Every structure is written in structure tokens, then in C-alpha cells.
Image (tube, rainbow, N blue to C red):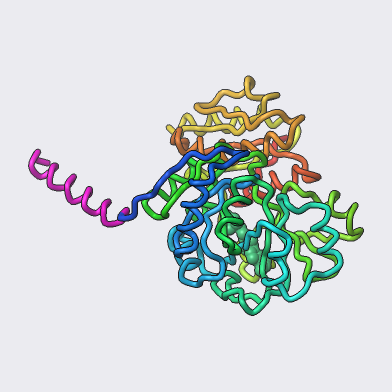
């Protein structure tokens, strides 16, 4: 290619990029516990005017819009590239904001509200007429959450609206746990990012359907089955949670049928007796074929692996730390341009269930037995 030609190609590319990225995304640092009133007021105004604002919650960053405005909610789907039948969660900042958006509050729901709100628990209710179809993906139920993060609470309160907010990532990618993850996916596509630092829990909220008896968990998260059972007695768990979706699979949380949390590399989970030896053997074979190999390890095992990129998600003794780090580590494998990633597995109980649910999806349910 001649120099002139190369320059012309570069210019065309720049113009094309400018057309795709027309919007200027404002990014503002905000105090995590005591958010600055002027910044919150500016963000709230954007939401009231139908714009999109990404903000931190105690789980992951959310991409917020006015949840009663069809056009604003449609912009969420466009910015994320999200399938339109995957409904959004409405976020509130006071318990009094629940009544107007749901048909009723069942007894079990009230007990769960008293025990876990504000916090990382989303509940599915029969929806009120004011909730647009764009939010619910055409379902007659609506998902509602009352987050405990000071920035999220201040923003929703100031906007004075229920805020529809899915995770602030491109559809299919790991959810964002830092403002830089949001910027990488959505810069130029949304109006504002509030940067409140790394989120504390790091996996999306537990989703429980309280429109059925007993309540049924549709997505595992920080509020575990065991914790809810102590409050309401019986709690079911959707049998489809840890299974590969089949063609006739009709998930109750529509988001469950889509690929999720996936880095660009092929991810495989490895379980069994000698996981370290098995992963090292596999890594050797892949490297011989010229592949760049990553290992998702733990503090207890990271020194034992021989691979191009070995990243620890934290200590096996602290599952909450692993939950907080998981999505960042999955994104780091992209930054390091690995071709294949082998990951250790975690227990399917308590907080481990939420971690395994996300890991299985990122691996497309591929499991290798080490024996
Ligand atoms: P995210 O977009 O990552 O915040 O995920 C929101 C999740 O909530 C998705 O898995 C949705 O399918 C689920 N969800 C939202 N509304 C409903 C609903 N009415 N019934 C069942 N699941 C829902
Ligand atoms: Mg999501």
C-alpha cells in the first residue's frame, strides 16, 4: 500500500469511527459514600430528559434510563446490543416507590423486603399498567430492585423515577465492575458514566420470583437460597440454572438463554482430582499449537501453573472475594489476548453457586474431567 493510500484509508476509518461514536460520553468521578450533590443533579437531569447514565451499584455498574419512558428504554437496548425480549430491572430508592409499579406485594415478598432491601436482591412481581412493555419484554411481570449503594440511591432519588438498569456492558460480555469496563464497552454510546470505583460484591443481584409460591430463584447471587429460606421457609431454585439451554428451553428469566460473561478466548472449566496437572497438560498441548493459554487460578494454586497468563481470582477461603474479582479477571484475559482459558471450579453451594453459574455461562457449559 502506498503512503497516500494508507493515509486515505486511515482518514476514512476515522470518519467512520466518528459517525459510529457521535455521542460524547461524559465521565465523572464521584465519592462512593458521599456523592457530590452537583454531579448527582446533573446525572439525574440527563435521566429525566431521556438520556442514559451508567452508575455504580453494590453488585455491578448499571446502565440507567427513565423506566417509564419507552424511548429512553429502547436506547438501553441499542447501546448494549441487547435482544429486545430480555427484560430490564426497575431500580427504586425507597420502599414507597414499589407500590405504583406492581399489582400486589405477596406476603413472602414483604418478608424478603424487610430482611434484604436495600441490597443485592431483585424480586419479580405482577406488573402495574404504568410499566411499559419495553421494560418487561412483553411479560406481565416486572423485576424490581432497591440497591444499597449510596451513588445509586442518591441518583434514583434525585431523578424521582424508577430507573431501568441492566448491567452497563455490551450484551454478552462480562458485566462491568469498574468504570473503565463501562467506558471500554459503551464510550460514545451513552451520555454519562459516574465513576464510583470498583463495586464491592461484583456479581449481579440474586433474582427471585415472588409472583409464585414458594418463591423461585431465577438467578443466584449474593443473597443465597439458604439466607432466604431462613426468612420465608420454602424457596425453590430453577432447575435450568446450571444446565446448558436446549432449543426447547423456556427460561423464566429470559436473560438465561443468551451467551454471557464470555471473554474472546475459548473458556473451559476443569474439575476432578488433579486439576493442576490436567490444566498444565492441556496448556502444554495448546502452546505446542501456537495458542496463547490463560489459567483462571486461585491464590492457593496460582504458583503451580505453567501457562502464558495465570490470573488468580482470589482465595478459595473467601468466596466473596472471588465473586468481586471474577468479571475483572475474565476481562483481563481479553486484554492479554489469550486464545484459550482453563478455569478452576467452585462449590455449588452458598455463594459458590452464583460464581459457578457465571463461570459455566462464560465457558458455554464446557467441562473437562481431570482424572
Ligand atoms: P441484567 O441485564 O444483567 O441486569 O440482567 C437482568 C436480568 O433480569 C435478566 O436475566 C432478565 O432476563 C431478568 N429479568 C428482568 N425482568 C424479568 C422478569 N419480569 N421476569 C423474569 N426475569 C426478568
Ligand atoms: Mg447483564
Q: Quadrant of the C terminus?
A: top right
Position in image of residue 31 (x %, y %): 56, 37
287 versus 101 height, above or below: above
Rendered view: 111 above or below 298: below
| Residue 93 placement, left or right of 264 | right
Question: Taking the image as drawn, is residue 301 in sight?
Answer: yes
Q: Is residue 76 left or right of residue 329?
A: left
Using the rendered view, name the quadrant where residue 237 is placed: bottom right
Residue visible at 40% across and 47% down in the picture = 26
**Residue 91 image offset from top left, x and y in percent:** 63, 59
Seen from the viewer's position, the closer of residues 41 and 20 is 41
Q: Quadrant of the N terminus?
A: top left
Q: Is residue 12 magenta?
A: yes
Q: Residue at x 44, y 36 (%)?
A: 337
Q: Residue 350: percent from the left, percent from the top?
A: 80, 44
Q: Which residues are magenta?
A: 1-21
Amino acid at each position: 500500500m502506498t503512503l497516500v493510500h494508507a493515509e486515505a484509508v486511515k482518514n476514512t476509518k476515522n470518519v467512520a469511527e466518528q459517525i459510529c461514536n457521535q455521542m460524547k460520553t461524559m465521565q465523572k468521578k464521584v465519592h462512593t459514600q458521599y456523592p457530590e450533590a452537583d454531579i448527582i443533579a446533573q446525572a439525574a437531569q440527563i435521566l429525566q430528559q431521556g438520556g442514559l447514565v451508567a452508575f455504580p451499584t453494590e453488585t455491578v455498574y448499571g446502565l440507567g434510563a427513565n423506566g417509564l419512558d419507552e424511548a429512553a428504554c429502547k436506547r438501553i437496548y441499542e447501546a448494549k446490543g441487547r435482544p429486545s425480549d430480555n427484560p430490564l430491572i426497575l431500580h427504586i430508592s425507597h420502599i414507597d416507590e414499589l407500590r405504583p409499579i406492581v399489582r400486589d406485594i405477596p406476603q413472602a415478598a414483604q418478608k424478603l423486603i424487610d430482611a434484604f432491601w436495600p441490597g443485592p436482591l431483585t424480586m419479580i412481581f405482577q406488573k402495574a399498567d404504568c410499566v411499559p412493555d419495553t421494560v418487561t419484554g412483553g411479560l406481565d411481570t416486572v423485576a424490581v430492585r432497591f440497591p444499597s449503594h449510596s451513588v445509586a440511591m442518591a441518583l434514583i432519588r434525585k431523578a424521582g423515577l424508577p430507573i431501568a438498569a441492566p448491567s452497563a456492558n455490551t450484551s454478552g460480555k462480562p458485566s462491568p465492575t469498574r468504570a473503565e469496563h463501562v467506558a471500554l464497552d459503551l464510550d460514545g454510546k451513552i451520555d454519562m458514566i459516574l465513576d464510583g470505583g470498583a463495586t464491592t460484591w461484583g456479581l449481579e443481584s440474586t433474582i427471585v420470583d415472588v409472583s409464585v409460591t414458594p418463591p423461585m430463584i431465577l438467578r443466584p447471587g449474593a443473597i443465597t437460597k439458604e439466607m432466604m429460606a431462613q426468612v420465608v421457609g420454602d424457596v425453590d431454585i430453577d432447575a435450568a440454572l446450571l444446565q446448558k439451554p436446549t432449543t426447547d428451553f423456556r427460561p423464566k428469566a429470559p436473560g438465561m438463554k443468551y451467551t454471557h460473561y464470555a471473554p474472546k478466548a475459548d473458556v473451559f472449566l476443569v474439575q476432578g482430582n488433579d486439576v493442576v496437572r490436567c490444566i498444565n497438560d492441556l496448556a502444554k498441548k495448546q502452546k505446542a499449537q501456537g495458542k496463547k493459554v490463560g489459567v483462571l487460578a486461585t491464590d492457593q494454586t496460582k504458583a503451580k501453573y505453567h501457562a502464558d497468563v495465570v490470573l488468580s481470582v482470589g482465595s478459595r477461603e473467601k468466596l466473596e472475594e472471588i465473586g468481586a474479582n471474577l468479571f475483572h479477571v475474565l476481562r483481563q484475559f481479553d486484554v492479554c489476548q489469550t486464545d484459550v482459558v482453563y478455569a478452576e471450579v467452585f462449590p455449588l453451594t452458598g455463594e459458590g453457586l452464583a460464581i459457578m453459574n457465571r463461570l459455566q455461562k462464560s465457558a458455554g457449559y464446557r467441562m473437562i474431567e481431570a482424572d
